[in-house]
Amino acid sequence: MISIEILKQIQLLKISTRRIVDNLFAGDYFSIHKGRGTDFLEIREYDPQEDDVREIDWKVTARLGTTHVRKFREERDLMVFLLVDMSGSMGYGSREKNKLDTVVELAALIGMSVIKRNMRLGLIGFSDKVNLFSRPKCGRKHLYYILESLCSLKTENRKTDINCALRHLNNVARKGTVVFLISDFMSEDYSTMLKVAQVRYDLIPVHVNDPLEWEMPKVGLVEMMDQETGEVVTVDSSDPNFRKNYKVTAMKLKKEREERFKSLGLDHILTSTDKPVVRPVKELFYRRANIRGGRRRF
């Protein structure tokens, strides 16, 4: 039985994200990969920066004396998977929202954009094991089922195993699937599996963080609990050396993570619990539209 609070939350997500998607993400393209469709669209002059040589229409080229291509409408049969981190650390939040709240907003925004294009949406929720799985389907009813599942989540003191999630993805997703890997990336080394997934899928890491993870405020003695192990330690946040080391460590981890994504050519999103998720998602779609070499479509 769905609680009244969850129903209200889903209704608010439906209203807010529908407006955003209608206003900002009205374009056709979701993946950076160019598919080859079956519906004829147009014949136009060949552009080496944008067009595949396989699209050249040699008969038209011979007749007109300049190279022309035959364009087809993009195939819409894309599959999109949300890989959502459900580990203990995702329940943390120093402001009004925690990381999991931010994940739900991301899922609603991405999901609404997916179903607007009549594409299939799937879900893998994971911690140190796969906790949730929903096969990719089309339609609003399926999206609302996914949002209901995420809104009902209760994080446990479990660690993050991104390798586990990516191995499961290999068993259920086909090549070319668009994959949003949404996590705080507090996981053991996952570089190898990330590299394998990057070759097979259109992979988009989405890093969810909280402001307190970057910088510790000066508030005296503070009890800090590791959300994934339950271990509690008391620290003196008034100690300038502690705050400095805390920030240095956080920035080092951030740099390592970004360099890992960059080395694999992965375009990632950075979101925070204290900021709206719309802007970083919008910026990602603009970048991907530009990568495809076409006109601005989002």
Image (tube, helix red, strand yellow):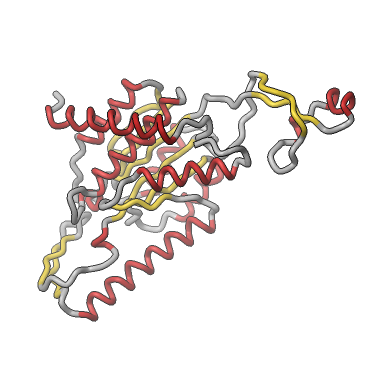
Q: Classify residue 222 by image quadrant.
A: bottom left
Rendering coords of residue 90 (x, y %)? 25, 49
**Residue lying farthest front?**
23
Rendering coords of residue 147 (x, y %)? 27, 31
Q: Is residue 19 left or right of residue 150?
A: right
Q: Nearer the viewer, residue 213 or 233?
A: 213
Rendering coords of residue 239 (x, y %)? 18, 79
Q: Is residue 149 left or right of residue 195?
A: left
> How many numbered marks does the figure carry?
0
Rendering coords of residue 76 (x, y %)? 53, 25
> Which residue corresponds to the image point at 51% horizontal and 57% vertical from the top-left?
262
Q: Is residue 33 left or right of residue 124?
A: right
> Which residue corresponds to the image point at 41% horizontal and 44% vertical from the top-left?
281
Q: Nearer the viewer, residue 122 or 286?
A: 286
Relative to 155, residue 27 above or below: above
> Which residue corresponds to the image point at 45% horizontal and 59% vertical from the top-left?
258
**Residue lying farthest top?**
39
Q: Classify residue 137 by image quadrant.
A: top left
Tell me the quarter of the image containing the N terminus: top left
Relative to 268, residue 151 above or below: above
Relative to 174, residue 87 above or below: below
> Which residue corresponds to the image point at 32% horizontal and 56% vertical from the top-left?
186
